[in-house]
Amino acid sequence: MTSPDEVALATVELLGALTYGQLRSFQVTASAIRLAPDARSADRLADFAVREHRAYELLREHLRNRTDLPAAVMDRQKPLFDAYFDGVELDTWRSANAFFALGLPLAADFIRQIAPALSPETALVVVGALADRGPFESFALQALLGEMTDDESRAQARHLIADILGRALTGFQGAIADTDALQVLLRADQGGDDTGNDLVRATAMAVLEGHRRRMHTLGLEEVD
């Protein structure tokens, strides 16, 4: 059986990952303002950047309430997230919106899947921070649709999105190999004694299904 101490440590590790990831999300959103094609789009993105920073502050505060070493916990997650964010192409308006419309929702779907395994207080904080981006995602989706005007631009969008997904999966696999925090939380929630591999796999499949639905909305993939 999973002990309360194991669950507490796993929760702190997960929070550290989500908090540092959210900090990078804010940085990317703010940096993308320079790519906006007009002042109105730049203004909207500035508002979204403020929202991303507020979400970071909420996560950071919750992490601080759970551990005396919040910075150290975040530093442990830094290499994986830096590799992801620094590797994704984010130097054009199209690539930025591909990330906002298809990359950020991966994190939202992930947190919705694991929220039941968290305490009610932690679930409320992380869902609010990561899964409450409706206006942001809709804005990016519409902007991306506006960029896909012909077969070439649609092919470029597919390439950008495939790269985002591939890097996200690589990072997820790296995190799973590096820590058993997710397995601990999911196993404790299910009350089982197995390694949790099947639960982690089911979580990943649910996230991928959400990604496929968004691809269908963009007209880039058929849904069976």
Image (cartoon, rainbow, N blue to C red):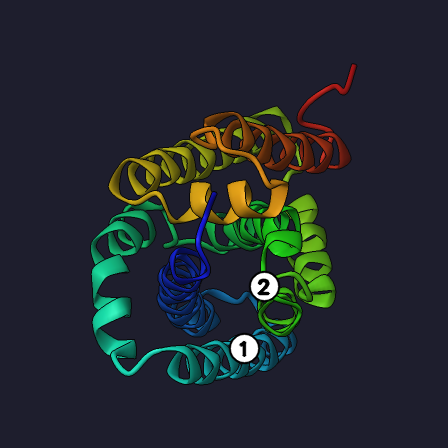
Residue located farthest toward the top when viewing the structure as drawn: 224
Residue at point 60% right, 66% down?
119
Q: Secondary structure at mark 1?
A: helix
Q: Position of residue 190 (x, y in %)?
A: 62, 40
Along the viewing direction, whichever of 74 and 211 lies nearer the viewer: 74
Residue at point 35% right, 33% down?
173
Marks 1 and 2 close (CB-CB < 8 Å)? yes
Along the viewing direction, whichever of 5 and 200 lies nearer the viewer: 5
Alpha-carbon span between mark 1 and mark 2: 8 Å
Q: Residues within 10 Å of mark 2 (few under 14, many from 20)?
A: many
Instruction: Answer yes or no: is residue 105 visible.
Output: no
Q: Amino acid at mark 2?
A: Leu
Q: Position of residue 204 (x, y in %)?
A: 54, 33
User: Horizontal placement of 224 versus 102: left or right?
Assistant: right
Instruction: Answer yes or no: is residue 187 visible.
Output: yes
Task: Determine which residue is flagged by label 1.
Answer: 55
Which picture quadrant has residue 191? top right
Mark 1 or mark 2: which comes first in sequence?
1
Task: Determine which residue is flagged by label 2.
Answer: 130
Q: Position of residue 132 (x, y in %)?
A: 69, 66
User: Horizontal placement of 13 versus 104: left or right?
Assistant: left
**Relative to 54, is 159 above or below?**
above
Q: Amino acid at mark 1?
A: Ala
